[in-house]
Amino acid sequence: MLKLKKVISMFLAIAMCLGMAACSTPGQKQEPAKPADAAAETPSETTPDKKVLRYSLTADAPTLDPQLMNSIPSSTVGFHIYEGLMRNHIGEIQPGMAESYDISEDGKTYTFHLRDAKWSDGVEIKAQDYEYAMRRLVDPATASDYSFLVTSLIKNAGDINAGKMAVEELGVKAVDDKTLTIELNNPTGYFLSMLSMSQL
């Protein structure tokens, strides 16, 4: 019995060696890596200085419109290219585009002070950009899937979303280029964490 096991083991070992040898191409030799040409390593003076992020997704992102991103691929890209007023860093809410913020004593008015930043085209990011985005979020013409997040929170958002008021009545105002105020209907402890979403 022991002799039979040794014979079978030997045949299996030979079969494995033959199988591995069959997987290689005859005469194929692996060449050692050649050192890169020094000229190829030095960027030419005509090459523009680009910063490129490559990110693998399981599917194409159907839209990069922040108020219409309702798929995982779109939201994943949006997370990387749009900065909310706040940032969620491993469950800890930190300032994002807002360098600092103040909350009124009644907990219903938030004042955000924006940091200096620019869009990818070099234009300065302003509080008016966030005012526009929030108005667009609740505008019934946009039909954003995420408008429900703020319709009961932000002053007048529900009536605007229902078509009963103009978007200019939203409780979000750009006081100046670097100051944004948001008025809530009621104090909301989780409001800052919501502002880390790229859709808002």
Image (spheres, rainbow, N blue to C red):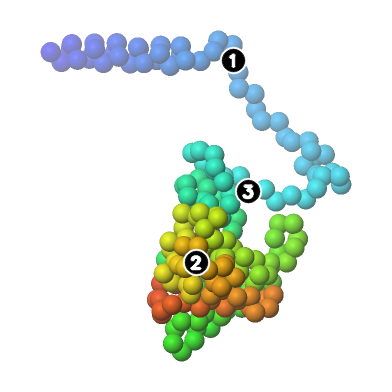
Residue at the farthest left position: 1
Quickly name the residue at label 2: 164
Residue 88, numbered circle:
none
* Nearer-the-camera pick, 134 or 75: 134
Q: Residue at x 15, y 15 (%)?
A: 2
Residue at the farthest front position: 164
Residue 28, numbered circle:
1
Residue 151's image quarter? bottom left
| Residue type beneath disc 2 | Lys
| Number of the front mark, 2 or 3 | 2
| Number of the front mark, 1 or 3 | 3
| Residue type beneath disc 1 | Gln
For marks 2 and 3 on the same chain, the one whose residue lies earlier in the sequence: 3
Quickly name the residue at label 3: 53
Q: CA distance from mark 2 to mark 3?
A: 43 Å
Residue 145, position as x, y percentages in the image: 46, 54
In screen coordinates, is 52 left or right of 194? right
Residue 154, position as x, y percentages in the image: 47, 72
For marks 2 and 1 on the same chain, the one whose residue lies earlier in the sequence: 1
Residue 146 in the image: above or below residue 91: above
Q: Residue at x 49, y 39 (%)?
A: 58
Q: Residue at x 87, y 47 (%)?
A: 45
Q: CA distance from mark 2 to mark 1?
A: 75 Å
